[in-house]
């Protein structure tokens, strides 16, 4: 029996969290550098070969000037706003994400391509690839900070991510499943392939997000085989106490429901045991609007409270917006998004697809994602499930943010292995078609998308490890499907050609797993993280008093706060999880003249360096 076989027998729970729209270089490219603080000056022996940044990478702008990769620590602005935002919101304007815009970014064209550039992939000469990010970002209507698209974060700015990377395993060769935006990439994480539509005329594979939310009267979604269906047909030996083989947890809303028909049908069921919220901060006691009935939360299940217990497979979705819940009957006000998606916080909708970044729609701060990962890891580490779990953390796509490594050729999902379907609608994946983004027409799913961050956390992984593919292909979101199938005894099963053994590398079969490892890294603690990391308010005659929520944590350390400005008041609010300090921060412009007022809020904890959070109020009465 191999080391990985022994580890497989020990893993009873696989937990996946998929964040949004960041490249590997942006999140982990500067993980180790001589200028970093300890322990991030040099990589540990097991991570010596990570393909990160040198500091010399660049793109050209429209004028032919080099725009170098760099880390920004100063606040940023956008052209439509006079407000400053923390450097951890960069890029404050959402880069281009759809297929045709990523085609420009990857293929380095000065204009957006009008036809599919991946008919032969990779090209004979790959040296000129990954040079179109600045070209494309300059096309975005609000882009005034060209440098933002070439930004990277440091371990100091991402302390939880850096902690997990250094203490467990990093994969520097995990790619999005195809070169486009969120929905299809997340579909690959569930189905190892995209969504498919049937009309009266034909069937075709999907590419861009808009195709998933078109008027359902004109098409029918095909229920493609999924990891969820596979686990229900051949159940793991130990379902949770409700009999659930898998669960999806979400904060404000679930994209899994919107991309996977099997999940959508369960969400509509009055007997749902598979789809619940992460905790109660977004919906409280209200049933989320996407569900007909709800079940225990991740917080319940990981802590075995309210009748909860952890399922064999858990997929966790972050908070995508700060407006969805209050617009759909949930809590008001809500916490900031923790998805790490660049751009504004407001819910994307067909009615408001191009919302501008401003005081009412501030850019998403990656500090929110850090708090989310801290909460997730600490709850798992402190639970009875830790010594039999595998946690995978990745991002769905690079989101138009620079990465220097070109995506390699990919295997088309090809032959579909239908589950419990005696009359399958087709035998192989139909070709792609997109009436909105014609560049995607004819795409053969033969190219991966950009490189994204990926971390693997388990007590069976030696600290400072590097996850390296055991096949001729890199990791992509299909590897989630392959890994879950392998962990739960379905080694001879695949959903299609993309997640087949030998194509999609399995994490559980990699060399990073060893039953003799006893990684006893403790919970993350000792560094205060606050989200957002700065607060900006605007007041007028109708809104002299304005309140925003601020969430802070340092792990298992009790925090306190203070502020002395008369126009700034702070009170605490309740939180469902331990060790989080959630503050209601209120500014009051009554009696003040038109001006810009600066203050700060200090958060401290015993034995910790205090964190000073800037607060700005712009009065325009």
Image: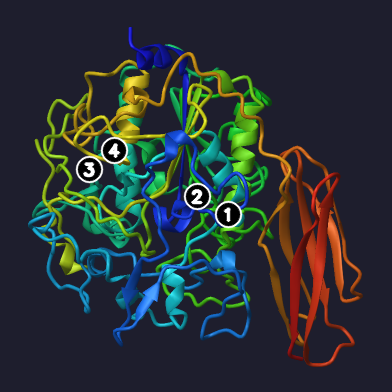
State the separation of the CA atoms marked 2 and 4.
Answer: 28 Å
For marks 3 and 4, the one nearer the N-term is: 3
State the separation of the CA atoms marked 3 and 4.
Answer: 19 Å
Residue 478 - label: 4
State the separation of the CA atoms marked 1 and 3.
Answer: 49 Å
For marks 1 and 4, the one nearer the N-term is: 1
> Is there a contact, CB below 8 Å, between mark 1 and mark 3?
no
State the separation of the CA atoms marked 1 and 2.
Answer: 7 Å
Residue at image position (35%, 70%) is: 58
Q: Which residue is under mark 2?
A: 32
Q: Secondary structure at mark 1?
A: loop
Residue 418 - label: none
Q: Which residue is under mark 1?
A: 36
Q: Which of label 2 and label 3 is nearer to you?
A: 2
Q: Which residue is under mark 3?
A: 222
Residue at image position (40%, 52%) is: 52
Q: Secondary structure at mark 2?
A: loop
Image quadrant where one finds the N terminus: top left
In this view, 366 is above or below 596: above
Is residue 47 found left or right of 240 in the rendered image?
left
Residue at image position (48%, 62%) is: 152
Q: Out of 54 and 132, give the one closest to the viewer.
A: 54
Image coordinates of residue 34 in percent, x first then y, are 53, 54
Image coordinates of residue 47 in percent, x first then y, are 43, 38
> Is there a contact, CB below 8 Å, between mark 2 and mark 3?
no
Is residue 485 visible in the rendered image? The answer is: yes
């Amino acid at each position: 029996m191999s080391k990985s076989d022994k580890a497989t027998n020990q893993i009873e729970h696989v937990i996946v969290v998929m964040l949004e729209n960041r490249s590997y270089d942006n999140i982990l490219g500067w993980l180790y550098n001589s200028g970093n603080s300890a322990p991030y000056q040099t990589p540990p022996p097991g991570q010596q070969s990570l393909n990160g940044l040198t500091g010399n990478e660049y793109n050209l702008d429209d004028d032919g000037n080099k725009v170098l990769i760099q880390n920004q620590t100063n606040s940023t602005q956008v052209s439509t706003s006079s407000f400053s935002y923390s450097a951890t919101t960069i890029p404050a304007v959402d880069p281009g994400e759809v297929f045709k815009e990523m085609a420009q970014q990857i293929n380095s064209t000065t204009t957006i391509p009008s036809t599919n550039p991946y008919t032969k992939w990779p090209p004979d000469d790959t040296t000129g690839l990954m040079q179109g990010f600045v070209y494309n970002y300059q096309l975005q209507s609000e882009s005034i900070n060209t440098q933002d698209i070439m930004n990277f974060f440091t371990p100091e700015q991402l302390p939880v991510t850096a902690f997990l990377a250094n203490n467990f395993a990093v994969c520097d060769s995990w790619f999005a499943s195809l070169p486009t935006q969120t929905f299809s990439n997340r579909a690959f994480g569930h189905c190892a392939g995209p969504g498919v539509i049937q009309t009266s005329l034909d069937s075709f594979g999907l590419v861009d997000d808009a195709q998933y939310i078109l008027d359902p009267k004109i098409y029918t979604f095909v229920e493609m085989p999924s990891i969820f269906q596979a686990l229900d047909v051949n159940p793991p030996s130990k379902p949770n106490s409700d009999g659930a083989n898998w669960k999806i947890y979400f904060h404000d809303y679930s994209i899994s429901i919107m991309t996977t028909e099997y999940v959508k049908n369960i969400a509509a069921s009055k007997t749902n045991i598979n789809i619940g919220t992460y905790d109660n901060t977004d919906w409280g006691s209200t049933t989320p609007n996407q569900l007909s009935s709800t079940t225990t939360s991740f917080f319940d299940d990981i802590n075995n409270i309210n009748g909860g217990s952890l399922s064999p497979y858990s997929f966790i979705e972050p908070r995508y917006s700060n407006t969805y819940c209050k617009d759909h009957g949930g809590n008001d006000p809500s916490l900031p998004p923790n998805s790490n998606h660049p751009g504004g916080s407001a819910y994307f909708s067909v009615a408001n697809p191009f919302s501008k970044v401003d005081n009412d729609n501030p850019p998403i701060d990656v500090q929110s994602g850090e708090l989310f990962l801290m909460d997730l890891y600490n709850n798992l580490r402190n639970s009875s499930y830790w010594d039999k779990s595998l946690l995978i953390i990745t991002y769905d796509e690079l989101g138009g943010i620079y990465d220097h490594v070109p995506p390699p050729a990919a295997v088309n999902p090809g032959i579909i292995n239908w589950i419990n379907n005696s009359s399958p609608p087709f035998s192989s994946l139909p070709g792609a078609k997109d009436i909105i983004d014609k560049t995607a027409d004819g795409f053969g799913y033969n190219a991966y998308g950009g490189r994204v961050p990926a971390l693997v956390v388990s007590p069976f992984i030696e600290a400072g490890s590097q996850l390296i593919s055991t096949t001729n292909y890199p990791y992509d979101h299909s590897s989630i499907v392959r890994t879950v199938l392998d962990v739960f005894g379905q080694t001879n099963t695949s959903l299609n050609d993309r997640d087949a053994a030998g194509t999609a590398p399995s994490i559980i079969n990699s060399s990073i797993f060893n039953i003799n490892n006893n990684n006893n890294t403790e919970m993350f603690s000792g560094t205060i993280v606050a989200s957002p990391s700065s607060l900006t308010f605007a007041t007028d005659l109708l809104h002299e008093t304005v309140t925003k929520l601020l969430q802070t944590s340092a792990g298992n350390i009790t925090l306190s706060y203070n502020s002395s400005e008369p126009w700034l008041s702070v009170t605490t609010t309740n939180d469902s999880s331990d060790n989080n300090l959630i503050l209601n921060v209120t500014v009051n412009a009554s009696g003040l003249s038109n001006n810009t007022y600066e203050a700060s809020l200090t958060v401290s904890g015993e034995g910790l360096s205090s964190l000073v959070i800037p607060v700005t109020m712009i009065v325009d009465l």
